[in-house]
Amino acid sequence: IIEDLSDYTHRFDLLGGYNYVGDTEKILLGLGFKREVFNNQTETFSGGWRMRIELAKLLLQSNDVLLLDEPTNHLDIESIIWLESFLRNYPGVVVIVSHDKMFLDNVTNRTIEISLGKAYDFNKPYSQYLELRHEIREKQLATQKNQAKKIEETEKLIEKFRAKASKASMAQSLIKKLDKVERIEVDEDDNSVMNISFPVSKEPGRVVVEADKVTKAYGDKTILKEISLLVERGSKIAFVGQNGQGKSTFIKAIVDEFEYEGNIKLGHNVQLGYFAQNQAEYLDGEITLLQTMEDAAMDTNRSKVRDMLGSFLFRGDDVEKKVKVLSGGERNRLALCKLLLQPINVLLMDEPTNHLDIKSKNVLKAALQKFGGTLLLVSHDRDFLQGMSNIVYEFKDQQIKEYLGDINYFLEQRNLENMREVEKKDVAKAAAPKESNKTSYEDQKKG
């Protein structure tokens, strides 16, 4: 019995039995859960948080091979940064399917891209792979061009020698030589990308959105408390923060989707465009893509809906498909296309990159950068956010904090703030024993 107990104890230790509580807490905290919800029932969490629970369970198993399909979709920026650190130090093999470019660059050291029926495999992070693939394709094009020139010269010689009977044997020799030449192939490039252009709209007044002491609670839980915010014409604003801190709630309040305390006023001539996080769910699955667009179009642009669908990669018979057969990415593209039917000068976008591939995200980003109106953007995609805003608002503990800069400035400032918090805790810890010793000495003197 003692030997069995020793074996079981050893195995328990090897499997991390003594560390599982600490590891569980570390992973849950890293993925954004607060200690006070650790003992809550799973069914009390929303779909996004349940996905985090599933991810936490997977990370705790310490498997030899970890397969992750779009792991960042339901995470906020802080949780993504934590997950990057965790995966970089993961002892096993990690295989990731993701459209988050920065996440891939920060975690992976090998890239396999599947494009047009071929797989391209390089021992490089994603961005380096793109550069290398581009260089290889350019070399292929140059070599192919050089080969084509030589083939053309040889064919001219053959025609020249054929004209003379004395040179016929030379012509045949060149023909045989040409037949043996292995033609250089150039990797196909998938250039099918969306073409997004926002319609021109009237210019609004100087102030486009004015929020005054906005408060919103769900039952006993207050999400936003007396939020006041002024948005001026032409501003490019990013809303960031942990999930559940009120980013989407505030956007929904602006479009008057529910009742709230306080007041939100839209400025003169404001024409609002809104892309919800679950925008694709608002589409009617029983009608076709063409019907979806025609039903939402105005008389002035109804004749252009086929062209618009084509610019979003829905061509030919695709437009006659029912919406319910579309993939998540296709539904998002259709929802974006539908958004462009109306003139917009203030655009609210809540996680617009969900389900979009990297190329589509780049096209959307370029279109938003060219957009001349006001942009309020909720996103957890750091690469997408770069260069997109001149103001960042962080939603935290029912309040908002302003950062006058882009996402990189915000992340730098947050790092500094986190370091200061750590320093404060270290100082407090260092001071505690001294205080304790002092009290002990005073007690001794009294004694």
Image: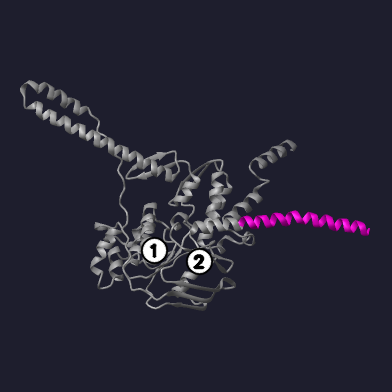
24 to 305, vertically: above or below: above
Residue 447 horizontal side relative to residue 423, left or right: right
Q: Residue at x 34, y 45 (%)?
A: 115
Say whether marks 2 and 1 touch (CB < 8 Å): no
Residue at point 43% right, 51% down? 99
Q: At which x and y percent is residue 416? A: 59, 56
**Most common SS among magenta residues:** helix
Task: Let me know if residue 203 appears in the view.
Answer: yes
**Magenta span has 432?**
yes
Front residue of this view, candidates 88 and 96: 88
Front one among 40 and 142? 142
Q: Could you say which quadrant of the image residue 275 lies in?
A: bottom left
Extent of the magenta region: 418-447
Q: In what quadrant of the picture does the N terminus appear? A: top right
The residue labelled by disc 2 is: 247
Residue receiving disc 1: 280
Is 313 left or right of 163, judged from the image as shown? right
